[in-house]
Amino acid sequence: AQSVSQHNHHVILSEAASLELGCNYSYGGTVNLFWYVQYPGQHLQLLLKYFSGDPLVKGIKGFEAEFIKSKFSFNLRKPSVQWSDTAEYFCAVKAGGYNKLIFGAGTRLAVHP
Amino acid sequence: ETGVTQTPRHLVMGMTNKKSLKCEQHLGHNAMYWYKQSAKKPLELMFVYSLEERVENNSVPSRFSPECPNSSHLFLHLHTLQPEDSALYLCASSQELLADGDYGYTFGSGTRLTVV
């Protein structure tokens, strides 16, 4: 069965620090990959997605992610975080038919001013 | 608002109660989903409806009963729940049939369920 693993459950950073959140998936076929973000008290929203082509994907708010097929990874990065990036981040993979998304457990990011 | 509306936002129910969660979308999407979000666990896919037909049931206990009367509405009927069923229940919708492969979900804000 497909699965998604996020390595860090909690990350604490100071403003302007660089961010990298790990995501690994297990699925042997063609994958579609996503990062979603959930700000405190808000709904889950799409940050970026990968379908094909350039493995370096740019999303909203300065986030990017790199798909490395050989490592089954799709890590999320941001060069300089802000306090407003405090949120929970979820990696997801589209698995099989009917647009079924399998999510990781999430990484809770806290950015201190 | 995201275009996917869930009601109620909060629900407290006893183990012998019967209640229903409602999800409504007016985005023209043709697929709808129920997920369970518990602390420190991955979002768990519960049910998938495509064109109002249930196409996935991920070994969910029968005390959870989904209903999709039309493409805009999705319900989750609850009865004789257990305290471990307390969680945030999220509804999502998507348009599966787009040629460009844009499979992103639109999520509702969720219903925070507490079983006492």
Image (cartoon, rainbow, N blue to C red):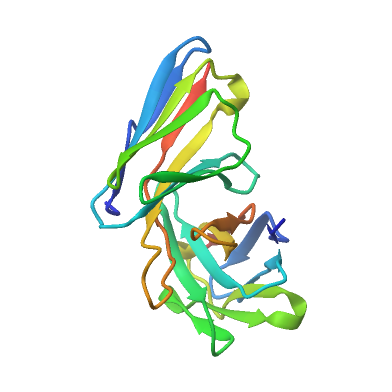
Where B60 falls versus A52 (above or below)? above
Q: Residue at x 59, y 62 (%)?
A: A96
Question: Residue at position x 56%, y 81% from top?
Answer: A79
Q: Quadrant of residue B9?
A: top left
Taking the image as shown, residue B5 lies to the left or right of residue A27, namely: left
Residue depicted at x 64% and y 73%: A75
Q: Answer with left or right where residue B72 lies relative to residue A6.
A: left
Looking at this view, is B73 or A25 the one in front? B73
| Whole-percent x, y for residue B47 in the image | 50, 42
- Above or below, B113 against B59 in this view is above
Question: Is there any visible trace of residue A113 in the rendered image?
Answer: no
Q: Is residue A28 visible?
A: yes
Classify residue B97 as left or right of residue B38: left
Q: Is residue A73 depicted above or below B14 in this figure?
A: below
Which residue is outermost to the right? A71
Q: Looking at the image, is B95 positioned above or below residue B111? A: below
